[in-house]
Amino acid sequence: MNVNELARQTAMDFKNGSSREPRWIAAAPGRVNVIGEHTDYNDGFVLPMAIERYTVIAASPNNTDRITLRSTAGDGVVTVDLAQPLKPGPKGHWGNYPVGVIAGFVARGVKPPGFDAVFNSTVPFGGGLSSSAALEVATATLLEAATGQTLDPVDKALLCQKAEHEYAGMPCGIMDQFISVMGRESHLLLLDCRSRKPELVPMSDPAMSLLIINTNVKHELTGGEYAKRRAECGQAAMALGVVSLRDVSADMLERARGMMDGTVFRRARHVVSEIERTLHAAEGVRASNWPTVGQLMYASHASLRDDYEVSCPELDAVVDIAGAIGPGGGVIGCRMTGGGFGGCAVALVRTESVADISARLASGYEQRTKIIPSLFVSRPAAGAAVLKG
Ligand code: ADP
Ligand code: MG
């Protein structure tokens, strides 16, 4: 279902619930990170793209001081009383994401009118494709239409990130909201997580696409692995006397090898090399140098698997099978994407071979793991937009 079909469907859902047409419709995409993993909290670079999966919100004013929110995929009706101070709802409830965004607008002195709204989405939840950012950014985009106040794109992304921190209790980085706001058709986004400077990188060749393979596993880790990795990066930076690993070159790190624990060294080696790979990959995409981009993706995976130790057998299986299909079969590169321990892999593929590659990956993966994966293909998609209003 493309974004216009989803918008039509959502308008219908809205009409069924409130017997009138929506006045405003807005959409925001999910995303996949092509390369640059575990670099964001080290002030490094990431290279995501928006995917052809969207969250759409349809709404109309209700001439009250209240906002009501429903979702085709979430429980209950969330009511926001604009006459009262806003606060988060029950922990884990989906309403916290949009309510946090509404609170962000109110805090900026942009008070929205009362309205009724319905959300609908084709972004899978909890699969690492950032349905949460799509939900926030769709809300913010609708609020722009409803208030007539367009935010600066960076401010808008940061407002949505703040909603996720303060209302959903998730201390995420800036990538998801930036790409959902700023994605552009046929472009990746090279994002400097230190300066927050976004740079669009054209990927105009329609012969190349990204295939997203959801392993459909999520290993529950009890050891606080994410916090541990962050702490190890901090230890490496401290040993090197720098603010963050962004300030470290491969040579510098090699020379300092004896000054840190072996595990800490390997964590740092992943981060330092991944930042370099991300910059090279952006150059490769710009030059349509696909073999180079593909090699960088495989190298990224090996580094995440061996040095950063955040992969898992299922992700490794996908990457192995993709590698075995190889350029002859239309697969140029493949790696895990997202935090790791399950979730999705992403492959750079020839568009014309997508059907064949998908079938081979799905059957190979099922044979190895006894799990049925979900796959879909996307070209770099457009960021958030007002579709009506
Ligand atoms: P991800 O962002 O990787 O998909 P998260 O755990 O960050 O995973 O966010 C998923 C949560 O976002 C869901 O559990 C749900 O609460 C909320 N969510 C996202 N999109 C919607 C939607 N369209 N309707 C209701 N809730 C949604
Ligand atoms: Mg999320």
Image (cartoon, rainbow, N blue to C red):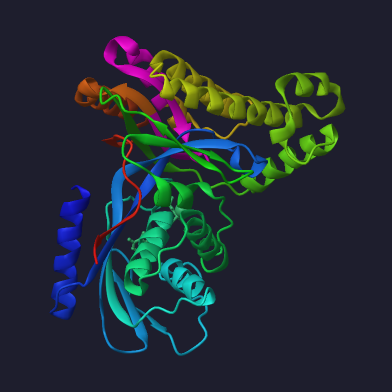
Magenta segment, which residues? Answer: 318-346
Q: Is residue 150 left or right of residue 235?
A: left
Q: Is residue 321 magenta?
A: yes
State the count of labels.
0
Which residue is located at x 47 percent, y 58 percent? 152
Question: Is residue 223 in sight in this rendering?
Answer: no
* Along the line of sight, the residue nearer the viewer: 279 or 372: 279
Q: Does the magenta stretch include residue 150?
A: no
Q: Where is residue 239 in the image (x, y as percent from the top left)?
A: 84, 34
Q: Where is residue 225 in the image (x, y as percent from the top left)?
A: 63, 44
If the image is split into quadrants, where does the C terminus sit? bottom left
Q: Can residue 192 be seen in this view?
A: yes
Toward the viewer: 191 or 377?
191
Q: In this view, does 358 lie to the left or right of 232?
A: left
Give me the residue at 20% from left, 47% from top.
2
**Residue 160 spot, x, y in % from top left:** 48, 61
Q: In this view, does 204 lie above or below 130?
A: above
Q: In which quarter of the image is residue 335?
A: top left
Name above or below for residue 347 compared with residue 40: above
Q: Residue furthest top?
A: 328
Which residue: 65% across, 41% down?
43
Where is residue 155 shown, x and y percent of the image?
52, 59
